[in-house]
Amino acid sequence: MTDRIRHYLADRPHEGPRLIVDLEVIRENYTAFAKALPDTRVFYAVKANPEPKVLQLLADLGSCFDAASVNEIRMVLATGATADRISFGNTIKKERDIETARKLGVDLYAVDCVEEVEKVARAAPGARVFARILCDGAGAEWPLSRKFGCVPEMAVDVLEHAHRLGLVSYGVSFHVGSQQRDPNMWDGALASASMVFRTLAERGIHLSMVNLGGGFPTKYLKKVPGVQDYGSAIFGALRKHFGNRIPETIIEPGRGMVGNAGMIEAEVVLISKKSDAKDDLRWVYLDIGKFGGLAETMDEAIRYPIKTRHDHAEKVPCVLAGPTCDSADVLYEKEPYLLPVSLEIGDLVLIEATGAYTTTYSAVAFNGFPPLETIVI
Ligand SMILES: *Cc1c(COP(=O)(O)O)cnc(C)c1O
């Protein structure tokens, strides 16, 4: 927790769960990315945290933006950033949304099949497109699986088709999986990307850009390499696969830009057991759960650091759950969470590194609970 967050919380009593975001941390993260990859442009992945003040800060720092919908595009434009700083990076778009994006001035679109290329060619003639290639997400704690992208051989055909339809075949993109803890995972994807570049060059189509995606981690409980390690590994892989003809590159950090900038304050609503057996696990219920913003605890994928005022006390394994009347609303059970034995009903807990993928996941009124409130400081 930063001092600024501590001061903010000190004299403001808890009513419901709230996310406090410290803009100073985001500023530091942006600077660290710019330093680790000096020749790469940053396209912040808006979905990680679309708070207007977060977007405004990043726009003022010179960031570009990866948007996935017309609404995200409008939120970026509201900061005063021009449309040439926006990529419509979702491979799954309605044709009328492409048309709207085009009218708003967006000129860069992601595709992963000829069907999507045809939509872009009709709705945004002459625009630039990049083809997303599949990545299996190995080494990532929140892999993006097979939903997006096509095999590299198909990306060649997709971009050739785009060229034939009068679009600008601009480049290749991939995402190595979110919370990617291995900086070397960019190597294989860059090998495939360079194959796509070479094959198309033989057909007279010259690509310009590699979109290196997101995947940069936030520190939760386990250690993660620093952004500088990612920068060197990526630069090494670019050198290896593109030699001295390194293309224009962009990154799309989401989690790595905002994750450690936010912290959720929550309250213990109930602590109980399911039987009188002496070794029965304690169940700790918070006023926030999977539907209040902690959806990434699905399959216990992301394990957040949790701080309490009893952290010096002995810790015991607990099942941690949310407040809604849905049995899926259990955060950690397969691997119980160690919490202080002296934790009490009514205590506040601080859930750290929750600046990314929390507010955007929170339901509007499941059981009447309001969506996660954000306070930006
Ligand atoms: C979500 C997303 C990102 C951000 O990923 P992180 O792992 O949070 O950095 C980047 N690019 C695309 C296309 C995405 O969908």
Image (spheres, rainbow, N blue to C red):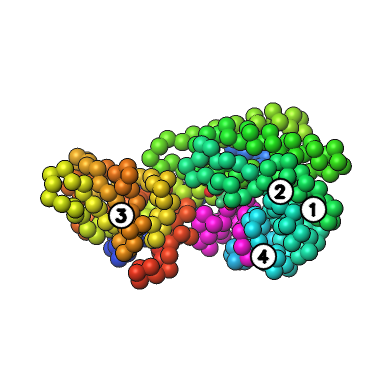
Identify which residue is drawn at 44% across, 47% down.
260
Rounded to the nearest whole Å, what is the CA distance between mark 1 and mark 2? 10 Å
Image coordinates for residue 191, horizontal then vertical, percent: 68, 33
* Residue 222 spot, x, y in % from top left: 40, 37
Quadrant (top left/top right/bottom left/bottom right) for the C terminus: bottom left
**Taking 271 as reference, is 231 left or right?**
right
Q: Which mark is residue 162?
A: 1
Residue 228 visible, this angle: no
Check if mark 2's residue and mark 3's residue have beta carbons within 8 Å.
no
- Looking at the image, do the residues carrying marks 4 and 3 touch, with CB atoms under 8 Å apart? no
Q: Amino acid at mark 2?
A: Ala
Residue identified by numbered label 3: 321
Image spot of residue 13 (x, y percent): 28, 63
Q: Earlier in the sequence, mark 2 or mark 3?
A: 2
Q: CA distance from mark 1 to mark 3?
A: 49 Å
- Image point (43%, 62%), residue name: 362
- Do labels 1 and 2 touch, CB within 8 Å? yes
> Looking at the image, is mark 1 or mark 4 earlier in the sequence?
4
Residue type pointed to by label 4: Lys
Name the kind of residue labelled 3 in the image. Ala
Q: Secondary structure at mark 3?
A: strand
Residue position for label 2: 131
